[in-house]
Amino acid sequence: MSPEYVDGDIVLINSFTDYYIDDVVVLDLPKIGYVIKRIKGFKEGKIILKGDNQKLHSSVCDQLHKKDDIIGKVVGLKY
């Protein structure tokens, strides 16, 4: 999620009942662990993700993810 978020940043997250396009969320994905991505859209009741780094592609953006995988929305950042 560079350039906005880089390794070592500490993010504050909060759980919500609704999430929207362009929300930055933290997901706990099976076999991968925690990831931070932006919501690109919704399809078939699932979410589509995108990263902010235009030079690097993430394989998690090629998949549909369950909303239950979201642990929270980023509401703060400490550098």
Image: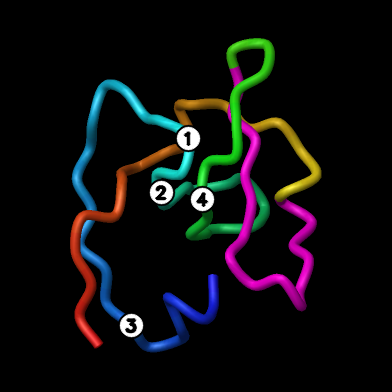
Q: Amino acid at mark 3?
A: Asp
The residue to which callout 1 is attached is 21
Pinpoint residue 8: horizontal percent, then vertical percent: 37, 88
How many marks can you see?
4
Look at the image and say whether residue 9 sits in the magenta stretch: no
Q: Amino acid at mark 2?
A: Val
Which residues, given as a range, are shown in magenta?
A: 46-60
Q: Nearer the viewer, residue 35 or 56?
A: 56
Q: Secondary structure at mark 4?
A: strand
Circles 1 and 4: CB atoms closer than 8 Å: no
Q: Nearer the viewer, residue 35 or 22?
A: 22
Q: Residue at x 40, y 44 (%)?
A: 23
The residue to which callout 2 is attached is 25
Q: Residue at x 54, y 70 (%)?
A: 1
Q: CA distance from mark 1 to mark 4?
A: 8 Å
* As drawn, 39 above or below 19: below
Circles 4 and 2: CB atoms closer than 8 Å: yes
Q: CA distance from mark 2 to mark 1?
A: 10 Å
The residue to which callout 4 is attached is 38
Q: CA distance from mark 2 to mark 3?
A: 14 Å
Q: Residue at x 43, y 76 (%)?
A: 4
* As drawn, 26 above or below 45: below
Q: Amino acid at mark 4?
A: Arg
The residue to which callout 3 is attached is 9
Q: CA distance from mark 1 to mark 3?
A: 23 Å
Q: If you read the primary sequence from the N terminus, does the residue marked by circle 2 or circle 3 appear first? A: 3
Look at the image and say whether residue 55 sits in the magenta stretch: yes
